[in-house]
Image (cartoon, rainbow, N blue to C red):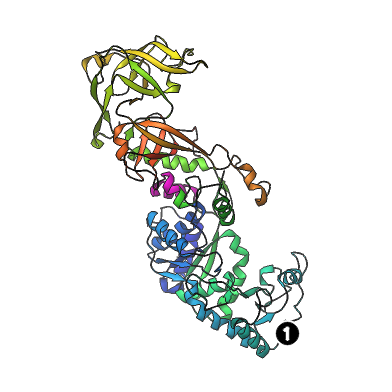
Amino acid sequence: MAENERTNFIWEAIKEDLAEGKNGGRVQTRFPPEPNGYLHIGHVKALTVDFLTAERFGGVCNLRFDDTNPTKEKEEFVDAIMDDIHWLGFEYGNVYYASEQYDQIYEYALDLIRRGLAYVDDLSKEEIRAYRGTLTEPGKNSPYRDRSPEENMDLFLRMKNGEFPEGSHVLRAKIDMASPNINMRDPTIYRIKYAHHHRTGDKWCIYPMYDFAHPIGDALEGVTHSLCSLEDEIHRPLYNWVIEVCGFEQKPRQIEFARLNLTNTVMSKRLLRALVEGGYVSGWDDPRMPTLAGMRRRGFTSPAVRDFIDRVGVSKADSVVDCRLLDHCVRNDLNEKAPRAMAVLDPVKVVLTNVPEGFREMCTIENHPKIPEMGTHQIPLTREIYIEREDFMIDAPKKFFRLKPDGEVRLKGAYIIRCERYDVDDEGNVTCIYCTIDPDSRSGSAGADRKVKGTIHWVDCTAGLKAEVRLYDRLFTEKDPMKDGSENFLNYLNPDSLKVVAAFVEPALGEAKPLDRFQFERTGYFVADECDSKPGAPVFNRICLLKDGYKPA
């Protein structure tokens, strides 16, 4: 990369390390997700920073699963995370698991005990919290802090052998109970947990804490720069302490950056799991979810997601990004790629009265108005068609340029039609519109030069297919669903986040393959649902509207 190209504070720090000859000129990063759920858009920022940093300096980025909490982790999540990384277009150098390092981590714990740098504590979780002190008051030593290394070793081995119940004993690092950083006040580094691990089975009943396993994993794997979100900044002294006391020559450097916060959604895996388990969404891949699985099913493209992350940038300051920026990036990408098609979401019938029964013509439609290479396709026009209900108005205002009584409009790719009359039901709803066509106005013919101010889309009644169309919107009505605390976030669920309509679509859409994307003329961008769409029985998800008035800064 040329020196005048874009950079960020992380890359500048790495340049300084390289200039000083650190790490032998080598750069290695890692992306360390916990396999307790699906990746969401917030994780994308972290993994993009990890992978692009390695790429920028000709290094490697490894994938390491932080599987130190067996009660919430599944192989399902491991597979999903790998799929998501590949979907984004990244390739990891190696795959590691914290659980593969349990034997080594355990040995480091034993060494700390022998050296008097760790002790087994019998205090309960609540008592440990009370002894830890506050931000303004120092903590006080546990009554078990001065046990001999021999006694601690015996107790720790008994913990490992399953002789104690959960919560009765923990192993704590012996650092400084008066430290101004609460994380340095004898943090817990091992706890008892009787749970089946998705990889190690029942081999272990003690598990290392993340703050102990994470730096050891980085050092064992040769990570040079451990890139973390900003909330890990206060944990950095503990990270460095573990590296030092364990005697690693290779000392990774932890650098923190601001995490991604997005409006009208939540990013906590705990809250996302509550949405799934509470049945508020259909699953982790529900198109309203901020998970990559959900976004992919919604029809978002990986280039659009990466463009969004690139626009957000890397900083040290927390901020909240408007979710409309993500839609903007998706819209920009699909505008250049998505073929055009016609679908009527709220149909009302139109009868063309001056054509005979059995009338049928094929009309040519451009697949993309600005990309001729994408070609054309044909759709049939017969005596009866559907148009959008909103494209006809009885008492139309002056600047309504769609269909109205005695008004004219062009059917896209076909003829100009004129409304002669209409039927309504007892409640005043229009049930059928009767029009005549101008036979000399067919698109592409000499008579097509006659101009009218409105062009509308349509679908033939005979050839059109019924389709289920799912209109997705924001999952939450509030920009900040957490404004009243995480316990109240469900109060702001959007009751209109999903509307399902029975639509009619042009015949070719019946053969759409899962994840095929289209621009439905004048309506928005849509994708054939990855799970439910079938040949002849299509299901389409709305990706985003054609426009929403949002302009990025």
Q: Secondary structure at mark 1?
A: loop
Identify which residue, 496 or 335, lies in the foreground. 496
- Tell me where residue 35 appears, x and y as whole percent: 50, 63
Give the residue drawn at x 59%, y 70%: 211
- Tell me where residue 445 appears, x and y as whole percent: 22, 18
For residue 381, which quarter of the picture? top left
> Where 73 falls versus 489 (above or below)?
below
Main secondary structure found in the magenta portion? helix
Task: Report the span colored magenta.
Answer: 295-313
Query: In the displayed structure, does residue 497 sit left or right of residue 540?
Result: right
- Residue 258, magenta (yes or no): no
Query: In the displayed structure, does residue 129 sit left or right of residue 219?
Result: right
Which residue, as the protein is rendered here, is positioned at the far front? 426
> Where 105 falls versus 236 (above or below)?
below
- Tell me where residue 389 appears, x and y as whole percent: 44, 22
Q: On the image, numbered disc 1 is attached to which residue?
A: 146
- Tell me where residue 311 appears, x and y as whole percent: 47, 47
> Where 162 falls versus 546 (above or below)?
below
For residue 161, which quarter of the picture? bottom right
> From the image, which quarter does the N terminus lie in?
bottom left
For residue 71, which quarter of the picture? bottom right
Query: Dot 1 surroundings within 10 Å: few (below 14), some, or many (20 or more)?
Result: some
